[in-house]
Image (cartoon, helix red, strand yellow):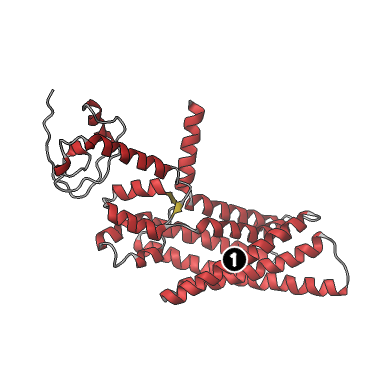
């Protein structure tokens, strides 16, 4: 049977995976085929391979190698990618305005590398553009998320009136958070000054405040957890408590203001991600303020847990969706 090859003209758009089924009927071509970006003047039967390579024996090998590359990338899927506002500014002179605008729809969403590549394929990014975006979109956010959790757990325990040795463990967690948030805050301030990004500088200041508040919580819970006594200990405990209260309150106010600003931007730009993230930041900021002022007790502690869980779930929703799908497939088998 002779298959007539037909060259089609496209505009750098991705061909759906279902189109690759045609290869199963061609002798010498492997069943596994990874659709790529189909450039103008390429043959649809070649899988994006330029016409000068058609009718050569290397086609089968090339397609097989492409498949192996994809399998190799899947082993690296533990990496997380997220496009921030700063990434869009950095990409401004590196990709076209149309491509830049299309990235707004996936801003602040966490992807695996494979998911990001698929999404960029859907947005008709070519290979060079994908590599540029991936370079800037590497997400360090999971470390900050962990530090935020370790920093906030002391307020939760206090709200639920947890006492005893649990406070000693809480003190250790707060100590780790103090170092981590301090490092993150310092880096944000440095990068913000370098990029002339005032918002990033403010976030860095908030990170340093969170670091100081965590240090105060560490001191208070260390003393209470090990039931240390004495005049000097009481003075240290009082200073640590004031440090935690003052800096925690200031950090909550900054989160509330920046969250409100992001909500307003999201409404103006019709950006759903900004509206949701901003609203969650406002909720966290408000709960942090109440916790710092010892208002609300268990209700405030529950609010902190709820807003933090909602923010993590929303930011990493693509990751949770992928994990849930894989787990459901395994159970179904």
Left or right for 87, reference 45: right
Q: Which residue, as the protein is rendered here, is positioned at the far top?
A: 1
For the point 47% across and 36% down, which residue is it?
326
Quarter of image, res 239: bottom right
Q: What residue is rendered at 33% in x and 38% in y?
A: 67
Is residue 227 toward the left or the right of residue 1 in the image?
right
Element on which disc 1 rests: helix
Q: Is residue 253 visible?
A: no
The residue lying at 74 percent from left, 56 percent from top is 169
Categorize mark 1 by other alpha carbons within 10 Å: few (<14), some (14-19), many (20+): many
Residue 75, compared with residue 163, is above or below; it is above
For the point 22% across and 30% down, the residue is 22
- The image shows a total of numbered marks equal to 1
| Residue 70 position within the rendered picture, expressed as x and y whole percent measured from the top left | 36, 42
Q: Quadrant of the N terminus?
A: top left
Q: Estimate the x, y position of residue 230 in percent, counting from the top left.
A: 88, 71
Indicate whether 180 appears above or below 333: below
Image coordinates for residue 143, horizontal then vertical, percent = 55, 58
- In the picture of the structure, the residue carrying the numbered disc 1 is 181
Res 58 quadrant in image: top left
Residue 29 image-quadrant placement: top left
Q: Nearer the viewer, residue 154 or 180?
A: 180
Residue 209 in view = yes
Residue at the farthest right position: 230
Extreme residue toward the front, this view = 57
**Residue 82's x, y, as percent?**
43, 56
* Frontmost residue, 192 versus 247: 192
């Amino acid at each position: 049977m002779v298959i007539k090859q037909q060259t089609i003209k496209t505009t750098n758009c991705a061909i759906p995976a279902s189109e690759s089924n045609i290869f199963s009927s061609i002798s010498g071509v492997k069943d596994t085929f990874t659709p790529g970006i189909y450039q103008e003047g390429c043959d649809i039967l070649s899988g994006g391979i330029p016409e000068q390579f058609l009718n050569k024996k290397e086609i089968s090998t090339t397609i097989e190698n492409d498949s192996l590359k994809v399998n190799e990338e899947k082993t690296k899927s533990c990496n997380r990618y997220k496009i921030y506002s700063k990434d869009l500014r950095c990409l401004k002179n590196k990709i076209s305005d149309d491509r830049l605008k299309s990235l707004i729809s996936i801003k602040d969403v966490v992807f695996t590398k494979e998911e990001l590549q698929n999404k960029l394929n859907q947005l008709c990014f070519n290979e060079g553009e994908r590599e540029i975006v991936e370079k800037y979109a590497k997400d360090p956010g999971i470390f900050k998320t962990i530090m935020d959790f370790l920093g906030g757990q002391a307020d939760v325990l206090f709200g639920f009136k947890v006492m005893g040795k649990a406070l000693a463990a809480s003190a250790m967690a707060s100590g780790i958070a103090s170092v981590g948030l301090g490092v993150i805050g310092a880096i944000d301030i440095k990068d913000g000054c370098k990029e002339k990004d005032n918002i990033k500088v403010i976030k860095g200041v908030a990170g340093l405040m969170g670091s100081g508040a965590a240090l105060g919580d560490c001191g208070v819970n260390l003393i209470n957890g090990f039931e240390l006594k004495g005049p000097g200990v009481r003075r240290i405990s009082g200073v640590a408590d004031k440090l935690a209260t003052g800096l925690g309150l200031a950090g909550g106010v900054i989160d509330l203001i920046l969250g409100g600003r992001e909500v307003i931007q999201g409404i103006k730009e019709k950006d759903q991600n900004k509206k949701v993230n901003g609203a969650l930041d406002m909720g966290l900021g408000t709960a942090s303020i109440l916790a710092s002022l010892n208002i609300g007790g268990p209700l405030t502690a529950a609010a902190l847990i709820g807003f933090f869980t909602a923010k993590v779930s929303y930011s990493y929703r693509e990751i949770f969706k992928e994990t849930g799908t894989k787990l459901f497939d395994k159970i179904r088998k």
